[in-house]
Amino acid sequence: MSDYPSDWPDGCPPADAVPPPGRVYRLVGGDPPLPEHFLSYHESGKSVSPGRECDARGLSVFTDPRDARNYLAKYPYLGTAIAAGGLSAADGRFKPTPRRPAPSHATWWPFPGRPRHVLFRIVDA
């Protein structure tokens, strides 16, 4: 299944989102990566600022492991480990969304029904 839910905001993911570029990194809560490490803010029921509803349906990833490491050091409450995964066009849409201190930060909108945690393994980034 590659269609996004009908209750998502119009234009989400954005039209300029593209297939994922391959290897990405994500902060996770332990080893092994578990399904709950790959829930969006929306799926977790967390409050979302107005205008951020689409972002809240995506997952934060990084294309540079150094940025993942920097983010983990600066925001340890976001995870305890870094997982790497190889994403393809079958896994959803992707858009660079640079953040400080992580210029390689991106948002990944996984396709519904696609596995997430099984695509990732803990790495020593």
Image (spheres, grey):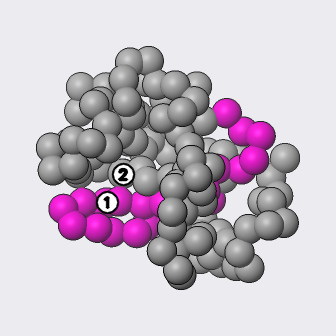
Can you say whether 45 is above or below 35 in the image? below
In the rendered structure, the answer to whether residue 61 lies left or right of residue 88 reads: left
What numbered label is drawn on residue 89? none
Residue type, mark 1 in image: Ser
Residue that appears at 67% across and 33% down: 115
Is residue 24 found inside the magenta-colored segment of the image?
no
What residue range appears in magenta?
93-115
Q: Position of residue 91 (x, y in %)?
A: 66, 45
Give how far across and how far down residue 67 sits, in percent. Answer: 23, 51
Task: Kindly report the distance in space between the C-alpha atoms of the residues bearing marks 2 and 1.
Answer: 5 Å
Q: Residue at x 36, y 51 (%)?
A: 62
Please determine whether, in this image, residue 41 is positioned above or below residue 119: below
Question: Residue 7, located in which quarter of the rendered image?
Answer: bottom right
| Residue that label 1 marks | 104
Seen at 57% across and 30% down, the residue is: 35
**Secondary structure type for disc 2:** strand
Can residue 72 be seen by looking at this rendering? no
* Above or below for 122 versus 78: above
Is 99 placed above or below 122 here?
Answer: below
Q: Label 1, secondary structure: give it.
A: loop
Q: Position of residue 26 (x, y in %)?
A: 39, 41
Please tell me how crowded label 1 is: few (under 14), some (14-19), or many (20+) other residues with Cα within 10 Å: many
Q: Quadrant of residue 31?
A: top left
Tell me if label 2 and label 1 are in contact, CB under 8 Å. Answer: yes
Q: Which numbered disc covers residue 62?
A: 2
Q: Earlier in the sequence, mark 2 or mark 1?
A: 2
Q: Residues within 10 Å of mark 2 (few under 14, many from 20)?
A: many
Q: Nearer the viewer, residue 32 or 120?
A: 32
Disc 2 marks a residue whose amino acid type is Phe
> Where the C terminus falls, by quadrant?
top left
